[in-house]
């Protein structure tokens, strides 16, 4: 999980996407709050337009501009609160609100040219908000802030009443605001991703078996038993499980040692994980040498095909012992249970399926091992 030192984002795109999805609820909440807060103050500052210009055509133009900002930012805030916006939609809402607000601010500056020194102070505050308070990609925030700064300096030179020294000082201060805004935002992005990296490590340690990398019993009970497997295949109309156990595993440990036994376990786990659909199926280390495969959207026939493929592959796989001199081969017994979710009245069904698959697996052992027993639950 390497973090880019310049942008503060993860170098690996899937990791960055996982981070953004993890933070999306918090991001939408922050976006909605910040845009609402900024909208209220942006509209409230119409009082300064009246104080500077009085009632007249220019004041009405600025009122229309501020109302446009309020409509844009307010709509985006409402969407952030009321709709499950995607990461891309959230960034679009942030960039659109910032762009409209800063463009209208340029209009305010032109129609009130005698106050460009105050406008420069206001712009500095707005740039801080763009960099730090409105959640957006740092690249987008930087482009918006830099373009706005350049346009403002051009307008100040054309419409403001500055000496060259004043213009230079104002430009330097805005450069300083952009620089520190960028560095502070970069640091914030970096820290939040370091936090996510630490959280991911702890989550992996809590949910995964350290030897095989498969999910552990905690994950099974905390997530899959509660029905979260539906999130992996929301359109699934059937569910199958495969419970498998390595045959004569105690004999492997007693004959070759626990180190070689661990290598057999890891080899079997690799075969299981390579055979499933990533992001849909789940492999759980159910016991010492027992593994559970949860297959949402897979019927009994599909579960049996998978079990047969696993059985044949594992039986043909050789594991080299730790000393490199011995090649170990083993077999496994499988119990496959499946259910049609539309006809199953028990909730949740996974517990019943596991119990059935457990009985089937022991039946396979009693019937000679290295075989599959299956059942369709009614």
Image: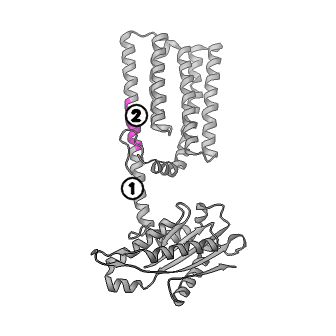
Q: Looking at the image, which residue is at 57% across and 32% down?
A: 97
Query: From this viewpoint, is residue 72 visible?
Result: yes
**Can see residue 126?**
no
Tell me, for residue 198, which label it has, or none. 1
Q: Nearer the viewer, residue 117 or 301?
A: 301
What's the magenta region? 179-189
Q: Position of residue 189 (x, y in %)?
A: 42, 43
Crowding at mark 1 (Cα within 10 Å: few <14, some 14-19, many 20+): few
Which residue occupies the foreground of this view, 153 or 269?
269
Task: State left or right for residue 248 relative to residue 299.
Answer: left
**Vertical arrangement, residue 365 with respect to residue 71, above or below:** below
Residue 232 found in image quarter:
bottom right
Main secondary structure along the magenta-highlighted residues: helix
**x then y, percent, for residue 78:** 63, 40
Query: Which colouring convention does the figure follow?
Result: one colour
Numbered disc 1: secondary structure: helix
Q: What secondary structure is found at the residue carrying circle 2?
A: helix
Going 48% across and 34% down the picture, which residue do you hit? 140
User: Residue tagged by mark 2?
Assistant: 182
């Amino acid at each position: 999980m390497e973090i880019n030192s310049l942008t503060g984002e993860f170098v690996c795109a899937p990791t960055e996407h996982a981070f953004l999805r993890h933070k999306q609820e918090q991001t939408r909440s922050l976006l909605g709050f910040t845009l609402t807060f900024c909208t209220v103050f942006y509209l409230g500052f119409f009082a300064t337009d009246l104080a500077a210009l009085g009632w007249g055509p220019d004041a009405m133009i600025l009122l229309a501009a501020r109302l446009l900002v309020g409509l844009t930012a307010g709509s985006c805030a409402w969407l952030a609160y009321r709709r499950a916006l995607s990461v891309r939609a959230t960034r679009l809402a942030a960039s659109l609100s910032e762009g409209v607000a800063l463009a209208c601010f340029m209009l305010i500056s032109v129609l009130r040219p005698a106050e460009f020194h105050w406008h420069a102070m206001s712009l500095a505050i707005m740039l801080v908000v763009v960099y730090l308070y409105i959640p957006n990609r740092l690249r987008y925030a930087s482009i918006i802030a830099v373009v706005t700064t350049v346009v403002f300096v051009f307008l100040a030179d054309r419409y403001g009443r500055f000496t060259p020294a004043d213009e230079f000082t104002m430009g330097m201060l805005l450069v300083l605001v952009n620089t520190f805004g960028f560095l502070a935002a970069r640091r914030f992005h970096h820290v939040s991703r370091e936090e996510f990296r630490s959280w991911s490590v702890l989550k992996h340690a809590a949910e995964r078996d350290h030897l095989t990398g498969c999910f552990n019993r905690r994950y099974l009970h905390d997530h899959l038993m509660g029905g979260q497997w539906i999130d992996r295949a929301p359109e699934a109309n059937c569910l199958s499980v495969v419970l498998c156990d390595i045959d004569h595993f105690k004999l492997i440990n007693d004959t070759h040692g626990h180190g070689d036994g661990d290598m057999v376990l890891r080899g079997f786990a690799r075969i299981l994980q390579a055979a499933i659909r990533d992001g849909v199926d789940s492999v759980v280390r159910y016991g010492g040498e027992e593994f559970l495969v949860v297959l949402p959207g897979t019927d009994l026939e599909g579960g049996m095909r998978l079990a047969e493929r696993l059985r044949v592959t594992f039986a043909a796989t050789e594991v080299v012992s730790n000393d490199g001199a011995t090649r170990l081969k083993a077999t496994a017994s499988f119990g496959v249970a499946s259910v049609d979710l539309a006809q199953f009245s028990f909730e949740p069904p996974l517990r019943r399926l596991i119990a059935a698959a457990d009985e089937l697996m022991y039946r396979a052992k009693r019937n000679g091992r290295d075989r599959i027993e299956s059942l369709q639950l009614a």
